[in-house]
């Protein structure tokens, strides 16, 4: 249920009682009292030591009173603490982060007043070769086919066709065949219209770098014989440009952030002959916060954000209506699996799940995604998730997969086999209690046959399934990227949650003695 947007309080401010005597007047009276006292007790200089002692004593008292009445500046307060930037710089040179942040917050589905309490954002105007030209040259982004359709409609992709038989007809215009690697474009377009964007960098708490890192490296990932230099080319240009900016230099990028539209591992090449670029390891990248669809859980500066799905609500009511639709859906299957086997892999776990599901055909539905059966442009997977209480979610090519969010958008409960598939990835977007919205099954027990997935899922009561589904539905707003450039009216989507938390993080960085 969505809460109404609270109005600002109209009650008058509480009356503050003023002191009967102004502080300056009190200090003047104190000096008069000292003068009278000395006149009475030191009429002459026959007892100079006593007079000197009394004079020094009363002057100390008056100085104490005077200083207590003066406000202590933030400059003087901060001198008692080490510089947060020098502390952080020292830490990141001498140690590696080995802890996983698990702090989460309750779902923030309703926007607050436009206060910008955590500060404002300045968006750099990068050379167009680092973003706009990459989109303009969409025919050159992969070796197999043009990416122009996938990047159309401001990155949302083609409008979904033939989907009205699966979703409510009036919601079908909110569905697109969206590519999973377009968060750079979606975030850039939204942030240009953000209520807390400032044109004056001197007023900024955060600085956004609109570099399309995923599109840039994707151009070279699948070309044979692409060199390490080619895969690093755009990143090096970006870093050279950004490091020349005075606002980057003043604190080594601690208040800078960007979106990298692929998984973290595509930017962590250690050796020239390995996969991907080495962008994250380049000098200058260390302190930049990075929004990624899959993060390295042991890197503080990597932040996992939801994969884009096909649902992009146009207004608040689209979200509310969709939540009601999936809540009331009649789910015919206990569980389902959508994916392709990886026959070239030893002990292919996807193949194992597919076979398990086929053997339980009265309870499980299988969607074989071999070839292009599950590519953008088909509603088969969405319909399968809508018809199933649970959806099996093994790891994809990496630890995460977009299917986890496709599943939850449809109100289906994810069944996970790797904790790194979700629990260590999306802390800002998922409930803090994994068992409240998901099922975790030890994959090794499935492999050796000691655990039956069907029996585990059948052990959940209807009441518990209902509560878990309701938790998934409650969080749907946090999984979607809204269509309007200014966002939804009152509901916070994935973009809003990410920006709020980045600004809050940077505000915390400013606190005296802050340590990460």
Image: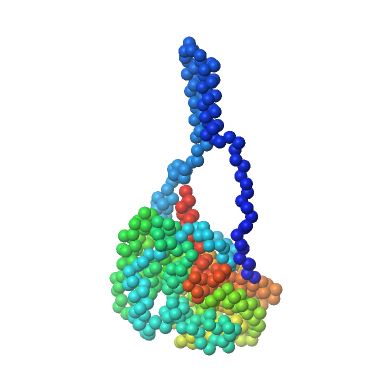
Residue at the image position 66 percent from the left and 71 percent from the top: 467
Q: Is residue 26 above or below residue 231?
A: above
Q: Nearer the viewer, residue 392 or 169?
A: 169
Task: State left or right for residue 376 relative to residue 363.
Answer: left
Q: Nearer the viewer, residue 296 or 487?
A: 487
Residue at the image position 30 percent from the left and 73 percent from the top: 230
Residue 402 image offset from top left, x and y in percent: 50, 76
Is residue 19 visible from the viewing direction of this image? yes
Q: Is residue 306 above or below residue 114?
A: below
Residue 180 image offset from top left, x and y in percent: 46, 77
Query: Quadrant location of the N terminus?
Result: bottom right
Residue at the image position 42 percent from the left and 83 percent from the top: 149
Task: State left or right for residue 433 relative to residue 141.
Answer: right
Residue 459 image offset from top left, x and y in percent: 67, 75
Q: Is residue 335 above or below residue 431?
A: below
Is residue 254 visible from the viewing direction of this image? no
Residue at the image position 56 percent from the left and 36 percent from the top: 22
Residue 399 image offset from top left, x and y in percent: 48, 72
């Amino acid at each position: 249920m969505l809460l109404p947007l609270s109005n600002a309080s109209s009650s008058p401010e509480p009356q503050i009682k003023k002191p009967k005597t102004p502080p300056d007047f009190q200090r003047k009276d104190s000096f008069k009292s000292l003068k009278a006292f000395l006149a009475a007790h030191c009429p002459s200089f026959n007892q100079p030591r006593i007079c000197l002692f009394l004079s020094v004593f009363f002057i100390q008292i008056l100085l104490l009173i005077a200083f207590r009445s003066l406000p202590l500046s933030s400059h003087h307060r901060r001198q008692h603490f080490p510089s947060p930037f020098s502390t952080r710089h020292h830490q990141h040179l001498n140690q590696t982060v080995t802890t996983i942040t698990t702090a989460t917050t309750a779902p923030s589905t309703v926007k607050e007043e436009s206060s910008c309490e955590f500060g404002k954002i300045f968006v750099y105007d990068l050379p167009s070769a680092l973003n706009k030209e990459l989109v303009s040259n969409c025919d050159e982004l992969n070796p197999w086919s043009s990416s122009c359709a996938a990047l159309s409609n401001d990155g949302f992709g083609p409008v979904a066709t033939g989907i009205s038989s699966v979703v409510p007809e009036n919601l079908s215009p909110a569905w697109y065949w969206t590519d999973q690697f377009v968060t750079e474009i979606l975030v850039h377009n939204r942030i240009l219209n953000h209520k807390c964007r400032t044109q004056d960098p001197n007023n900024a708490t955060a600085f956004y770098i609109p570099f399309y890192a995923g599109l840039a490296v994707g151009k070279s990932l699948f070309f044979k014989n692409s060199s390490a230099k080619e895969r690093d080319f755009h990143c090096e240009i970006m870093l050279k440009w950004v490091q020349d900016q005075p606002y980057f230099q003043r604190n080594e990028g601690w208040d800078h952030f960007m979106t990298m539209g692929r998984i973290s591992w595509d930017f962590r090449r250690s050796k020239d002959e390995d996969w991907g670029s080495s962008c994250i390891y380049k000098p200058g990248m260390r302190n930049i916060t990075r929004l990624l669809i899959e993060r390295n859980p042991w890197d503080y500066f990597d932040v996992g954000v939801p994969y884009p799905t096909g649902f992009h609500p146009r207004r608040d009511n689209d979200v509310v209506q969709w939540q009601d639709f999936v809540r009331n859906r009649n789910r015919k299957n206990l569980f389902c699996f959508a994916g392709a086997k990886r026959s070239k892999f030893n002990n292919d776990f996807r193949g194992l799940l597919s076979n398990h599901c086929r053997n339980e055909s009265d309870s499980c539905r299988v969607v074989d995604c071999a070839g292009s059966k599950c590519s953008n442009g088909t509603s088969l997977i969405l319909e399968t998730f809508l018809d199933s209480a649970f959806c099996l979610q093994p790891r994809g090519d990496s630890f995460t997969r977009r299917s986890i969010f496709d599943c939850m958008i449809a109100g289906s409960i994810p069944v996970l086999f790797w904790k790194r598939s979700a629990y260590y990835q999306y802390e800002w977007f998922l409930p803090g209690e994994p068992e409240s919205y998901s099922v975790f099954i030890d994959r090794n027990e499935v492999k050796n046959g000691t655990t039956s997935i069907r029996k585990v899922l059948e052990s959940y009561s209807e009441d518990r399934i209902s509560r878990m589904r309701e938790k998934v539905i409650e969080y749907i707003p946090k999984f979607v990227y809204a269509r309007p450039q200014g966002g939804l009216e009152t509901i916070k989507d994935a973009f809003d949650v990410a920006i709020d938390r980045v600004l809050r993080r940077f505000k915390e960085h400013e606190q005296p003695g802050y340590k990460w």
